[in-house]
Amino acid sequence: MSDNNKHLLLWIDVETTAIRPEDGQLLEIGMRITNLDGTSPHDSWDSRDPYKFSTVIPHSRINYTRDTAHAIHMHQNNGLLDEVLDKEQPEKENIWLVESFDRLAAVSGGQHITLHPAGTNVDFDLTWLKAYGNLNFAAPAWNSNVSYRKLDLTTIRLTLNAIGINPYGNSKEKPTHRVDDCLNRDIRDWQQWYEWVKSRELLDDNGLTKIEGLSPLLKRSLCERFGSKENA
């Protein structure tokens, strides 16, 4: 990566009533900006954090079809549908991203800001965002600052599955299917993965792995941090 770039992660999550935009409706959008290690460029993740954003998308009605039935029931149970139907249309929802670019540029020391989309199933979220007309993703700030390179945590979780570790086995919290909770989980998982890889020192000076195969000790370490111990 170029030394003249400041690389950050743009965490994204959306809640919807369907898999494809043509089949359903967008209900909620959440975004966070972090450093590459998952820490906030700001002091904390409180309600005043300038690099934290979420909004509910208002609708006058929700379309109930075979494609949307499951998600509608899920979001009825978590209270999101009530918020969607009660909320008034907001103004200039995309101003948060533009203001974030301005703040980051002011403290970057002349470096170009590059944001890498991150989260679970990033392409799914980006497809819905681009289909949502009120967010202007043709804006110069998006085109010049958001990278085509993405960090998708599904890759890490499928890797763990491939070596016999259930990456969801250590989850103690029942999913709420709300964007803030999903983003908290993804960022926490990424921070743990980052710290684990950093601490293991798996590469030698030539960039070659120090281990051949997956040792029992290494697998046990992965299970303790990311998965069910039953799989160790």
Image (cartoon, rainbow, N blue to C red):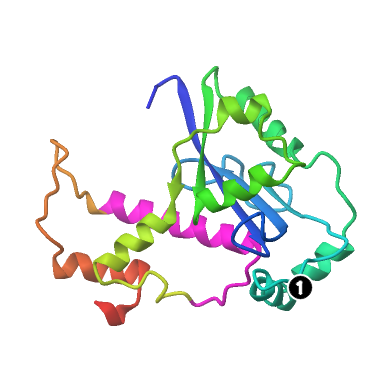
Is 144 within the magenta?
no
Instruction: Give the mark count.
Output: 1
Residue under label 1: 79
Kindly indicate the quadrant of the structure image that contains residue 41.
top right
- Pick the front one: 28 or 172: 28
Q: Which residues are magenta?
A: 172-199
Residue 51 x %, y %: 65, 42
Q: Amino acid at mark 1?
A: Gly
Tell whether 202 sits left or right of 118.
left
Q: On the picture, is 43 further left or further right than 172?
A: right
The residue sitting at 43% across, 55% down in the picture is: 153
For the N terminus, which image quadrant? Answer: top left
117, 51: nearer the viewer: 117
- Find residue 149 and report its image quarter: top left
Q: Is residue 107 visible?
A: no
Which residue is more in the foreground, 105 or 142? 142
| Number of other residues with Cα within 10 Å of mark 1, as a class: few under 14, some 14 to 19, many 20 or more | few
| Viewer-nearest residue: 176 or 14 | 14
Mark 1 lies on a secondary structure that is: loop
Q: Is residue 27 above or below residue 151?
A: below
Residue drawn at the location 74% of the way across and 42% of the way down: 133
Which secondary structure class fits the magenta region best? Answer: helix
